Amino acid sequence: MVLVITKTNFETEVLGSDIPVLVDFYADWCGPCKMFAPTISALAEEYAGRIKVGKCNIDEEMELANDFRVMSIPTVVIFKGGQAVETIVGSLPKKSLADKLDQVL
């Protein structure tokens, strides 16, 4: 399941999480984001219980996007122990992103 990440739940769902969290920063109007969405959904299913997966709409959550210096979308930030440990700008093949997730487990 893909969570909706907002400023309201960010601290609880991401910073306070006891498992790693992948946050996909996207926008509804972004073509590459739409093409990347099935990859994010598939990884959410495959890593359920081991990694949380969330999506953050930069148009609705500009403050969060600014906090993590999101300049281009899609941008994926992987958090572990409340810290951003990896930032990936642009879409990646599913296998490449899965490899990154495996490294934080």
Image (cartoon, helix red, strand yellow):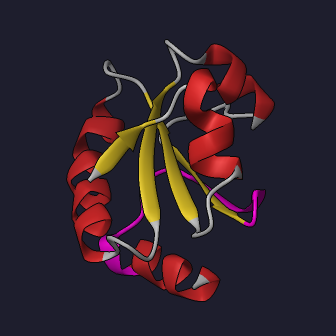
Task: Tell me: 45 left or right of 19.
Answer: left
The x and y percentages for residue 105 are: 57, 85
The x and y percentages for residue 95 are: 35, 81
The number of numbered discs placed on residues in the rendered structure image is: 0
Asked if 82 appears above or below 93 in the picture, the reply is above
Residue 7 inside the magenta-drawn segment: no
Q: On the image, which quarter does residue 63 sit in? A: top right
Camera-side residue of 65 and 73:
65
Camera-side residue of 89 and 54:
54
The residue at the point 31 percent across, 48 percent down is 2
Camera-side residue of 13 and 27:
13
Task: Tell me: 3 left or right of 89.
Answer: left
The residue at the point 34 percent across, 38 percent down is 33
Residue 87 inside the magenta-drawn segment: yes
The x and y percentages for residue 97 are: 44, 72
The residue at the point 69 percent across, 52 percent down is 16
The x and y percentages for residue 73 are: 51, 36
Asked if 96 appears above or below 84 in the picture, the reply is below
Report the span colored magenta.
Answer: 81-95
Camera-side residue of 96 and 50:
50
The residue at the point 42 percent across, 64 percent down is 92
Asked if 9 appears above or below 41 in the picture, the reply is above
